[in-house]
Image: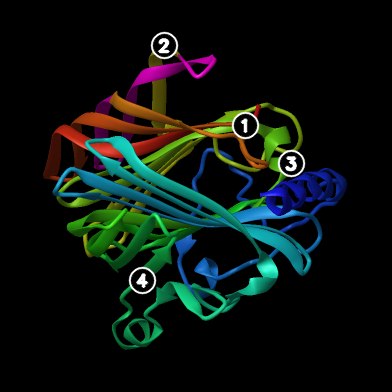
Amino acid sequence: MKKSISILAISVMLLIVTSANGLEITALNKEKSKLVINPITPKNDAFHGIEKYLSCEWWYFDAVFGNNYGAHLCIRVFSFKKWGVVQELVNIYNNSKVEEKSVTLKPLKDFQISKEFPDVKYKDKQLIKFDYDEYNKTGAWNYTISIDTGKIKLDLTFVGKSEGFTYVTSHEGWTVAQPKADVFGTININEKKLQVIGTGYHDHNWNFSLRTGIRATGWYWGKIMSTNYSLTWAKIKKTRLGDDTIAENLGIVSILNDGYIGIDSNNISFIASEYKFHTARFIPTKFSLYAKQDNLEINLTFNAVNIQHTEPDFFTINYWRYFVSINGYIRVGENTDYLKDDVQIMEFIRFI
């Protein structure tokens, strides 16, 4: 435990010292309301490992299963040049409440992480395995996730059902490899074994640092899955300090087995309301999202069913994961998917 605390302290100091440097990844479209997204490649979901300053990147997976269970998995890397730590985070939910969780910190030197395609190993154990052979044959995006924390052991397969995309600014990067996935496998919790089948999601973020906290105090983020669509959305809480490189409202509708539609920032709105006191802050418990662009229209409301607040770390001070009940519709052309009391996952992050 003392070793983990020392690693944490050193990481914070390096983060402060090294974040003063700049880094350009790619140019952003000057028309800020225009959302520019690009097709995904396996290299987008590989390790980026920015070396000019300490940064954070992570592979995020979650799933909601048919037996009232859910899972959230995250491999988070804090690195500067060849130095760093890796955080393995697992939450298992039962009826939207945490049944078991695990957080571990390990030195980066004990990991083998590919910079060519998504592949993460800890010593001789495979944590994230991308099926590169199947991708080369069919273009499919399939992953196997295997994590054993002692209290929790899981082996899950994520089979992509919607086309992924990449959104990169001149600072941060975000790729959604699986806007919607079929998920199946086993979860062992304290000797209890569960066979699970459900629906999941996977994305990857990189180059997040103190500079991110200068330009934004945090964000709301989530994805809403219906029969034919998956809406990935975010509301960035900007500070108006520093260079303005990211859209304030993000929305991408992925169509089952058929591509995606980017929603321009001016065509989507997100409202948070009905605040309540939770873990020393007032936070919202009701949300509405509306978008209209060409032949696309979205009108959704979601209400908090359960809220989990995670302990502060050296990337976030406050992080709330919500299970929300969603009602409304997503319409593309003449096809409309309706949602009624669908329970799904969103988050609210505040850096301060």
- Residue at image x 24%, y 64%? 186
Helix, strand or loop at disc 4? strand
Whether residue 157 is in magenta: the answer is: no
Give the spatial CA distance, label 1 vs label 3.
12 Å
274 relative to 242 in the view: left or right: left
The residue pinned by badge 2 equals 276
Q: Earlier in the sequence, mark 2 or mark 1?
A: 2
Dot 1 or dot 4: first in sequence order is: 4
Q: Amino acid at mark 3?
A: Leu
Q: Residues within 10 Å of mark 1 (few under 14, many from 20)?
A: some
- On the image, the x and y values in percent for residue 83 come to 77, 65
Distance (Cα) linking label 1 and label 4: 30 Å
Q: What is the total number of numbered labels drawn onto the structure image?
A: 4
Q: Earlier in the sequence, mark 4 or mark 3?
A: 4
Q: Earlier in the sequence, mark 4 or mark 2?
A: 4
Q: Are marks 1 and 3 in contact (CB under 8 Å)?
A: no
* Residue assigned mark 1: 317
Q: How busy is the neighbourhood of tag 3: few (under 14 within 10 Å), some, or many (20 plus)?
A: many
Disc number placed over residue 143 in the picture, else none: 4
Name the residue: 42% across, 64% down: 148
State which tag comes first along the sequence, 2 or 3: 3
Secondary structure at badge 1 equals loop
Distance of label 2 from label 3 (alpha carbons):
29 Å
User: Mark 4 near mark 3, Cβ–Cβ under 8 Å?
Assistant: no
Q: Disc 2 vs disc 3: which is toward the camera?
A: 2
Spatial CA distance of label 4 from label 3 is 31 Å
